[in-house]
Image (tube, rainbow, N blue to C red):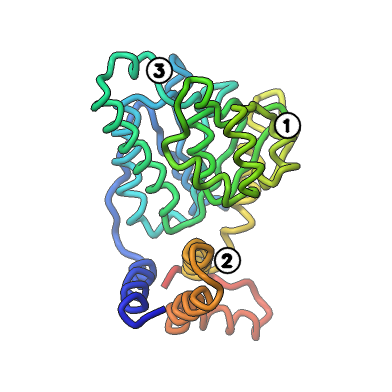
């Protein structure tokens, strides 16, 4: 990594270790609801897709609302883990709103796909871990959104897939790039070329989802598993978690030697923190550490 790129990366990583401060209240819209959990789940922020009349399909309004929420969430140091779920039974997200898209001109379609791609990049680039809970169908852009998250939990019977080629188009919100990085390029091509729809159980076998669970009577088994996973993350140092995410996300895009340099830069960010000293003191005193993100 040359000196100019290293300095740029150091500046980028340093933005994530600011001490706790006041933050703006997250925007809430009818189509995306924000729920800050409390008690022993304090630090978990749940984003709930809530457009049941269209199976949570991406409309202009949903994308605008979601984008505004992410702008605020990115600056929110009190959110240590984010869970993305659906509040609509039986579906995570059906992808693009095809009824709305049918009325768009070619230029409007291009602009909307660019906006949707940027939305999913914003999810991907949130500094804290993001878990997608797939309790229902995640198709097309909906599946691309799940791929933009750090981890995925799914109900065994949840349907998912990149189905765009059935409509004579391609995944346009990052799916052609993310899926080959999760799977092998050959298997990703097979799934994209065939527009195959598969289950959560199939997705785990392929390595697309982290955990698969039988669906429960309330239809939120994947969400419950995502909560359990988030609770495992919560006790750990939030700055360390954010730096670990940054090191992995940036490192997999470069050669191994450059990746080592990225890891070194990220490690340097945690050395001067109060949390690191708290971890050492807690270990010596044989107690649980209390991390404050400082």
Compute the Cα span from label 3 to label 1: 27 Å
Tell me the distance, in whole angstroms, between the alpha carbons under discs 1 and 2.
Answer: 29 Å
In depth, the one of 19 and 249 nearer the eye is: 249
Local SS, label 3: helix
2 or 3: tag closer to the N-terminus: 3
Name the spot of residue 282 as percent of width and height, x first: 61, 79
Viewer-proximal residue, 81 or 190?
190
| Separation of marks 2 and 3 at Cα, in angstroms | 42 Å
Question: What label does residue 164 carry, if any?
Answer: none
**Residue 97 appears left or right of 284:** left
Residue at figure coordinates x 51%, y 73% from the top left: 259
Q: Are marks 3 and 1 in contact (CB under 8 Å)?
A: no
Residue at left 39%, top 32%?
32
Circle 1 crowding by C-alpha within 10 Å: few under 14, some 14–19, many from 20: many
Q: Would residue 36 be visible to someone looking at this image?
A: yes
| Residue at x-position 60% and y-position 21% | 90
Relative image position of residue 8 (x, y in whole percent): 31, 73
Residue under pointer 3: 98
Label 2 with label 3: CB-CB less than 8 Å: no
Provide the secondary structure element on which disc 1 rests: loop
Is 85 left or right of 66, judged from the image as shown?
Answer: right
Answer with mark 3 or mark 1, whichever residue precedes in sequence. Answer: 3
Q: Residue 140 placed where, x, y %?
A: 51, 29
Q: Secondary structure at mark 2?
A: loop
Crowding at mark 3 (Cα within 10 Å: few <14, some 14-19, many 20+)? some
Q: Quadrant of the N terminus?
A: bottom left
Nearer the camera: disc 1 or disc 2: 1
Count residues near mark 2 (Cα–Cα under 10 Å), then give few for <14, some for 14-19, many for 20+.
some
Res 156 label: 1
Q: For the C terminus, give its image quadrant.
A: bottom left
Tell me the residue that label 2 is attached to: 236
């Amino acid at each position: 990594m040359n000196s100019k790129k290293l300095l740029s990366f150091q500046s980028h990583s340093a933005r994530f270790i600011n001490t706790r401060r006041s933050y703006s209240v997250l925007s809430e819209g009818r189509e995306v609801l924000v729920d800050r959990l409390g008690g022993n789940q304090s630090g978990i922020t749940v984003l709930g897709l809530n457009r049941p009349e269209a199976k949570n399909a991406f409309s202009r309004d949903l994308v605008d609302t979601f984008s505004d929420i992410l702008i605020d969430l990115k600056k929110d140091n009190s959110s240590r883990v984010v869970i993305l779920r659906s509040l609509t039974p039986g579906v995570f997200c059906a992808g693009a709103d095809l009824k709305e898209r049918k009325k768009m001109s070619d230029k409007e379609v291009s602009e909307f796909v660019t906006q949707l791609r940027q939305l999913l990049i914003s999810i991907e680039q949130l500094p804290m871990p993001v878990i997608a809970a797939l309790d229902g169908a995640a198709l097309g852009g909906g599946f691309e959104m799940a791929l933009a998250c750090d981890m995925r939990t799914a109900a065994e019977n949840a349907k998912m897939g990149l189905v765009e080629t059935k409509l004579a188009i391609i995944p346009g919100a990052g799916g052609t790039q993310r899926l080959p990085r999760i799977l092998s390029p050959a298997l990703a091509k097979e799934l994209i070329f065939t527009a195959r729809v598969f289950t959560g159980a199939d997705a785990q076998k392929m390595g697309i989802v982290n955990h698969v669970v039988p669906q429960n009577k309330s239809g939120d088994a994947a969400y419950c598993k995502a909560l359990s996973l988030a609770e495992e993350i919560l006790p750990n140092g939030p700055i360390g978690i954010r730096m670990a995410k940054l090191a992995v996300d940036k490192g997999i895009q470069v050669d191994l030697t450059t990746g080592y340099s990225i890891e070194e830069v990220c490690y340097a960010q945690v050395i001067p923190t109060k949390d690191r000293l708290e971890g050492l003191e807690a270990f010596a005193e044989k107690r649980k550490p209390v991390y404050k993100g400082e």
